[in-house]
Image: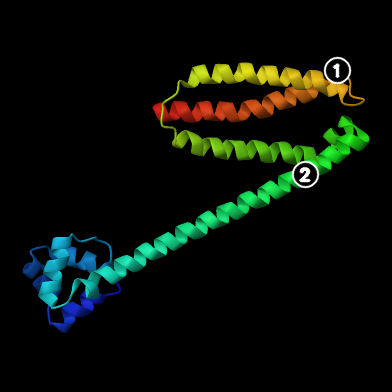
Amino acid sequence: MDNRIKIARIQVDLTQQQLAEKVDVTRQTISLIEKGKYNPSLKLCLNICHAVNKTLDELFWKERVWYKMKKITDERLILKNLKNIRNAYAIQTLGILSILGYEWITRGSEEMYENPLWFVFIVSTTALTLFSMNISVDHEVRKKAPKRNLIISIVIIVLISMAIGIFVPFTGKSGPINGLIVGGIGFICILIPYIYIYYLRTKQQD
């Protein structure tokens, strides 16, 4: 509390014990209040103010308003930083997709898959999905059946991976083997986040 209570107590020549007796609490409570480690009730605040001849504004409210304003400012800075990170990630992803798209159009899908940026794109997208799902599960309003949702997700992922595997050979010089490899990689990358969300949901239900 910026030692304002302690200063006010000393100004009226009271010890912690004497102030405690006046406001009907223990000396330890007064000590904690002076250190800012105990949040007194409104009644106790009024009693302390009366005992040391100070107003609520002089002893408590300014500190509380400052603390709330600082907390709001800190939260706004955190949100601003998160938005900046999100925007930077979006720009980075757009850049990677542009390079990969150009590689695919000019040199074919095989050259695109050999580009290290393809691996960076897969890893970063998987990581972002994991982090997003963690937040989503924490804020789910309606409880979901983890096993049922996982089975449905796996069926959909298998269909998507098969579609990718069939489509890849028609995009360039890639053969069926490359289509199978790409489909398998896609299956694993998409499956990992859903296994993670299954783990989060089962953990939430325990």
Question: Is residue 180 visible to the viewer in this orientation of the structure?
Answer: no
Q: Quadrant of the C terminus?
A: top left
The kind of residue on which mark 1 rests is: Pro
* Colour logic: rainbow
Residue 158 lies left or right of residue 169; in this view the side is left
Residue 5 in which image quadrant = bottom left
SS state under label 2: helix
The correct choice, above or below, for 156 with respect to 95 in the image is: above
Q: Is residue 86 above or below residue 10?
A: above
Which residue is nearer to you in this view: 161 or 17?
161
Give the residue at x 70% y 21%. 160
Q: Quadrant of residue 1?
A: bottom left
Tell me the distance, in whole angstroms, between the alpha carbons under discs 2 and 1: 26 Å
Query: Could you tell me which residue is drawn at 63 percent across and 25 percent down?
Result: 191
**Of pointers 2 and 1, the one earlier in the residue sequence:** 2
Tag 1 residue: 176
Q: Which residue is identified by label 2?
A: 96
Give the image location of residue 65, x and y in percent. Answer: 32, 66
Q: Neighbour class for label 1 at 10 Å: few (<14), some, many (≥20)? A: some
List x then y, in percent, for residue 100. 82, 39
Q: Is residue 157 left or right of residue 148?
A: right
- Dot 1 falls on a residue whose secondary structure is helix
